[in-house]
Structure formats: C-alpha cells, structure tokens
Image (spheres, rainbow, N blue to C red):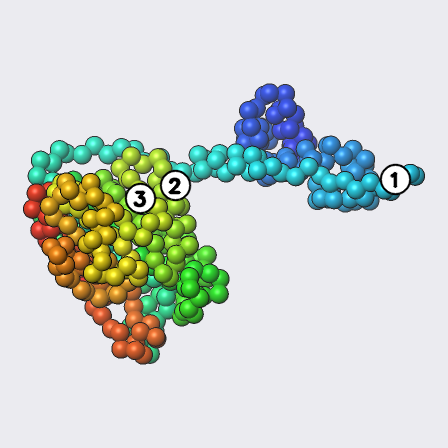
Amino acid sequence: MAKFKEMIIEAIGLLESGGAKSKHEASRIIGEKYSYNSENIRKNMGRYEQKSQHKALEIECQEVGIPAEAVGNYWYKGKHFSIHAKNKPVTYDQIRDEIIHDMNEHSPIYPSIDRDQITDGHLLVIDPADIHIGKLATSYETGDDYNSNIAVQRVLDGVRGIIKKANGFPIDQILFVGGNDILHTDNPRRQTTSGTPQDTDGMWYQNFLVAKQLYVDVLEMLIQVAPVHFVFNPSNHDYTNGFFLADVISSWFRNCQDISFDCSISHRKYYTYGSNLIGTTHGDGAKTTDLPLLMATEAPIEWSQTKHRYVYSHHLHHKVSKDINGICVESLRSPSGTDSWHHRNGYTSTKACEGFIHNKQFGQVARITHIF
C-alpha cells in the first residue's frame, strides 16, 4: 500500500488533472483504490496543497523534522530582507462547499408514503409541551424524579398513547408543535436565555443531541400515520438553542415529502385546516387576553376564511382553557417533572402530553390526554 503522504499527493494530482470534480470525489477514489479512510485523505489534502506552495518551507521542515502542514506563519531572514509568510488560508467558499456536500451525503432520503384516500379527514394536533430536556428533579426532594432519559421516554410514550387514542378518527393531517422549552438551558453555564441558573442533568451538547434524536424518532413515527406540519415556537429557556435545533430538524428531513416546516423565529404561528385557524405560542410574551386580537391582526386573510379559532399556549405547565371573545385560548400540561424551585414555591401540576382532534367543518371535536 502507498504511504499516507503518497495517497494525498495522488488525490491532489487527480483533482488538478480533472480526474475528479471535487476533493470529496478525489479522496473517495484514492480511498477505494488503497482501501483507506477517504475522509482522512480529504482533510489533509488542503494542508498539502498549501505546503506545495512553499517549497523552501517544505525542505526546511523535512530537515528539522517539523510537519510543514502544521505551520501557519513563518519568518524567512535573508541577507537583505526579513520576510513574513503564511500558508494560504481555507476560504469561506471551500468551507461552504464542504458543508453542502456533507449535508447531501448524510441527509436521509425518506420515500414518499402511499396512503389510502380519506374523505372525512381530521387534523391531529400533537403538542408535547415544555419537555425541558436537561432538567433535573429528584424524588427525595420533590417526590418526582426527572432527567433526560425520563423526558425522552415520557414523550415517546405520550405520542404513542395519543396516536392510539386517536385511532377512531380518520386522520389525514398532523400538526406537531415543537419548541416550547424543548431544552432546559441555553448556554454552557447551565442557565436559561436570560441567565437564570437551573438544576441540570447532562452537558448542554448531550441534551441538544438527545432532543434532536427525540424529534427525529417522533416525526418518523408520525409520518407513518399522516403527513406532518412541524411548527416551532421559540421560548424563554432555550431561545437560541431551540431555534438551532428546529433548523437542524428541518435540515434532517429536507428529503422527506411528508413533512413541512415553519421554523421562523416569529413568536406566534398560525395554521389553517378547513374552517379551523390554529395559533400557537409559547406563552411567555403577549398577554393571554391579547392573543385573539393579535391573531386577527397577524393572520387577517386566514381569519376571514375560517370559523373556528384556537390558540394553544404553553409555559405554565398546567391546564387553563378559556373562551375569549369566541376564541378558545388553552394552556397545555407538560410531561416534565417538578424541580426544586417549583416544588419549593408550591407549583405542582398533572404531568401529561396532550393532543387535539379537529374536524374540517366543526372545529375541535376531541381532546386527548396521556397522563403519567
């Protein structure tokens, strides 16, 4: 087998001669030729390309045993001048092209699902609110254990339970509400977006990956039932990381025709289904009494074309449902456990995931609650 350096040089030559259209293709060809990891070849191609532009540096480094590809800047002291030089930096275009290629390589392709035609369709709203992955609660103090593993299991059980309970209705569309404090903290210091310290389970990056996998698993489950519309609500615990997570999920399912996404940073989202206009918001911003007028102002066309109007809100972790000027405004229960601060202040509530069934003509016809 050729030495590692020789494989890299051969890959560079293949690229420069036009035998490959990109570094990825060149490294793949050489990797297959020598049964070697093509990713290692690709990562080092740029370094050797830079080194080849500095022949004197390469010779000097070989003599003293320093890897030239590790040298970023150097001085050359000649007879008449002292010259500062640096290896050619990687450009934005190179980084962009590599990211795009990696996304194309690793974004799963989901085949379109053939479905039976439904004449009397219904919308299933599934809204696992305020999951708070990364929250830590112990039964020793609060009577309720909660951590990332429990969070994931409750949501999976809750979604399965809602699907099972909705089995009597012909479902032709699912509205999945994401965000709403899916993550418990928003920085490495174990704080919310505004800096409030939290009792946490796991590192921030672990919790992000747990949340990502949870959403992937749930959405893969839901598309077996009906096409899904994913709507993201930004929230106070994870205002930035929650947005990043929603963008990651939309990228993951970019090749899936059975899911559509609304992942903008807008605090209130609106969705129409037949004569239903459904608004969703986290609930930490606008006053509850202002939500109906905001709906009419922010979605005037949808408002004029619908008869039954609802706003599903979150943040409170307990059930509040009230008709305000003919608009049903409803706060949802949460599956998350009671942590030290909430227990100390007496904020306890029923732990649950909730769903709703909407008929195109008659509006909300059923509520589904999966209690833990």
Q: Residue at x 65, y 25 (%)?
A: 13
- The foreground one among 192 and 18 is 192
- The foreground one among 201 and 245 is 245
Circle 1: element type: loop
Is mark 3 in CB contact (under 8 Å) with mark 1?
no
The residue to which callout 1 is attached is 81
Residue 131 is drawn in which quadrant? Answer: bottom left
Mark 2 against mark 1, which lies toward the viewer?
A: 1
Residue 228 is drawn in which quadrant? Answer: top left
Q: Which mark is residue 166?
A: none
The residue to which callout 3 is attached is 262
Indicate the amino acid at tag 2.
Ser
Residue 105 is drawn in which quadrant? Answer: top left
Circle 2: element type: helix
In the rendered view, tell whether residue 271 sits above or below residue 28. below
The residue to which callout 2 is attached is 251
Which quarter of the figure is the C terminus placed in?
bottom left
Task: Give the mark nearest the N terminus, 3 or 1.
Answer: 1
Point out residue 23 in the picture as x, y percentages from the top left corner: 57, 31
Task: Give the mark nearest the N terminus, 2 or 3.
Answer: 2
Real-space CA distance between mark 3 and mark 1, rounded to the nearest whole angstrom: 60 Å
Q: Residue at x 42, y 68 (%)?
A: 196
Residue 149 horizontal side relative to residue 327, left or right:
right
Residue 23 horizontal side relative to residue 286, left or right:
right
Indicate the amino acid at tag 3.
Asp
Circle 3: element type: strand
- The foreground one among 284 and 259 is 284
Indicate the amino acid at tag 1.
Phe
